[in-house]
DNA sequence: GCATTAACACGTA
DNA sequence: TACGTGTTAATGC
């Protein structure tokens, strides 16, 4: 079984559960590492876990029939995902790729459903997460259609630091300009130019593969 | 026009 | 050597 410390540092929602449910959740969690560039899930897979990102970075997306990679979201540390496929008992609709070496925490299906059936605290948590993600995706569609590339890059970065979805993020993330481009749907030269623009505006610092957020709120509304 | 791809030089782990 | 960054030239929508 994983240690108390591992549990509390990687499972942000645990503190919302009463002690007996925490203990049950802890017994249902295992860890797994995915190497950089490897797929964790392919479209069509069935999954048997609710999945939490402990460290690293995942990309949720798919490949179009013409072979183009489309990204729907970055999954940063402390973010949990996959509840939709578990609850609907359907195959995963999207690919999940590790952009760098990534450690995952896996809550097994039986425990997930036990909590779902028995824990009010857990259900509130799920509703809150799903609600927040819904809002995030709707906003993303809006931004894709209304904002220029600078605005899209700023929103994509800000969405990685959503405090409801990934509350342990702090202010820094290891992410290359190439990866930022993939998340925001722009090319690397554009990501490069926008990062310089945002840095000049004092909203973030970008250096050597890490981005430090200085003004998250302004980043979230950049370009409006 | 603006973005994209491809390519090059540079600095660093 | 491998990677990330900064930049430019050719090309496309």
Image: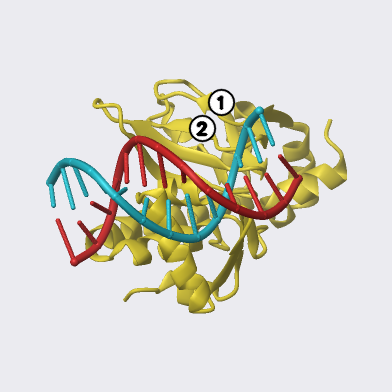
Chain colours: A yellow, B red, C cyan
Q: Chain of mark 2?
A: A
The answer to whether residue A68 of the structure is visible from this angle is yes
Do the residues bearing badges 1 and 2 touch, measured as CB atoms within 8 Å? Answer: yes
Question: Residue A41: where, in percent of width, then height?
Answer: 50, 26
Q: Looking at this view, is A140 or A222 the one in front?
A: A222
Q: Which residue lies at the image location 73% right of the left edge and 30% below the top edge?
A: A30
Residue A175 vs residue A44: left or right? right
Q: Which residue lies at the image location 42% right of the left edge and 64% below the top edge?
A: A194
Indicate the quadrant containing the N terminus of chain A: top left, top right, bottom left or bottom right: top right
Question: Residue A49: where, in percent of width, then height?
Answer: 59, 29
Q: Which residue is mark 1?
A: A38
Q: Is residue A78 above or below residue A48?
A: below
Q: Which residue is mark 2?
A: A97
Residue C6 vs residue A152: left or right? right
The extreme top residue here reads: A45
Residue A183 vs residue A111: left or right? left
* Numbered disc 2: secondary structure: strand
Q: Which residue lies at the image location 59% right of the left edge and 74% below the top edge?
A: A214
Q: Looking at this view, is A115 or A201 the one in front?
A: A201
Instruction: Of the two numbered discs 1 and 2 on the same chain, state the one appearing first in sequence.
Output: 1
Question: Residue C2: where, in percent of width, then height?
Answer: 63, 32
Q: Residues within 10 Å of mark 2 (few under 14, many from 20)?
A: many
* Numbered disc 1: secondary structure: loop
């Amino acid at each position: 079984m994983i240690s108390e410390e591992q549990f509390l540092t990687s499972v942000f929602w645990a503190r919302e559960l009463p002690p007996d449910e925490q203990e049950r959740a802890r017994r249902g969690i295992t860890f797994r590492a995915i190497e950089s560039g490897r797929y964790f899930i392919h479209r069509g897979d069935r999954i048997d876990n609710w999945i939490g990102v402990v460290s690293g970075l995942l990309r949720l997306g798919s490949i179009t029939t013409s072979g183009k990679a489309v990204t729907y979201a970055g999954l940063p540390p402390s973010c949990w995902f996959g509840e939709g496929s578990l609850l609907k008992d359907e195959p995963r609709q999207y690919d999940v790729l590790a952009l760098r070496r990534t450690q995952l925490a896996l809550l097994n299906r039986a425990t997930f459903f036990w909590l779902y059936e028995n824990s009010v605290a857990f259900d509130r948590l799920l509703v809150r997460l799903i609600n927040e993600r819904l809002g995030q995706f709707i906003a993303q569609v809006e931004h894709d259609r209304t904002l220029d590339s600078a605005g899209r890059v700023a929103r994509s970065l800000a969405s990685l630091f959503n405090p409801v979805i990934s509350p342990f993020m702090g202010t820094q993330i290891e992410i290359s300009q190439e990866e930022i481009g993939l998340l925001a749907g722009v090319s690397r030269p554009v990501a490069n130019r926008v990062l310089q623009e945002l840095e000049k505006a004092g909203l973030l610092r970008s250096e050597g593969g890490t981005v430090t957020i200085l003004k998250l709120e302004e980043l979230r509304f950049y370009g409006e």
